[in-house]
Image (cartoon, rainbow, N blue to C red):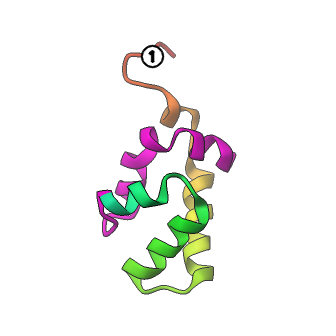
Amino acid sequence: MNWDRIEGNWKQLTGKAKEQWGKLTDDDFDVVAGRRDQLAGKIQERYGVAKDEAEKQIKAWETSATDSWFTKPNDKV
């Protein structure tokens, strides 16, 4: 998945991000606003992991993103 697409649909994808990183707050996600570097920083802060580990988690999450993440419940597939 392309990070630009994730960033552009951040509000829609915060639920998926919350499933992955439950320790992050709504305020954290508002601050992140789809910016990858900000997300890495918040993961480091909340989970006490190094930058490379945060980046690894983000990459895995990004890779797991599917087109279904970007469809609204009322959209016809």
Report x, y in % for residue 18. 36, 56
Report x, y in % for residue 77. 51, 16
The answer to whether residue 11 is above or below residue 59 is above
* Residue at the image position 48 percent from the left and 85 percent from the top: 49
Q: Is residue 24 one of those drawn in magenta?
A: yes
Front one among 59 and 13: 13
As drawn, is 26 to the left or to the right of 67?
Answer: left
Mark 1 sits on what residue? 75
Report x, y in % for residue 70. 51, 32
Residue 31, located in which quarter of the rendered image? bottom left
* Residue at the image position 51 percent from the left and 65 percent from the top: 39
Amino acid under label 1? Asp
Q: The N terminus appears in which quarter of the rendering?
A: top right
The answer to whether residue 45 is above or below residue 31 is below
Report x, y in % for residue 73. 37, 23
The answer to whether residue 5 is above or below residue 43 is above
Query: Which residue occupies the extreme front position in the image?
Result: 31
* Residue at the image position 66 percent from the left and 50 percent from the top: 3
Find the magenta span and give its range: 1-26
Answer yes or no: is residue 1 visible.
no
Front one among 55 and 9: 9
Q: Main secondary structure of the magenta part?
A: helix
Query: Which residue occupies the extreme top position in the image?
Result: 76
Front one among 24 and 31: 31
Please rate how many residues cluster around mark 1, counting C-alpha atoms within 10 Å: few if below 14, some from 14 to 19, many from 20. Answer: few
Q: Is residue 70 one of those drawn in magenta?
A: no
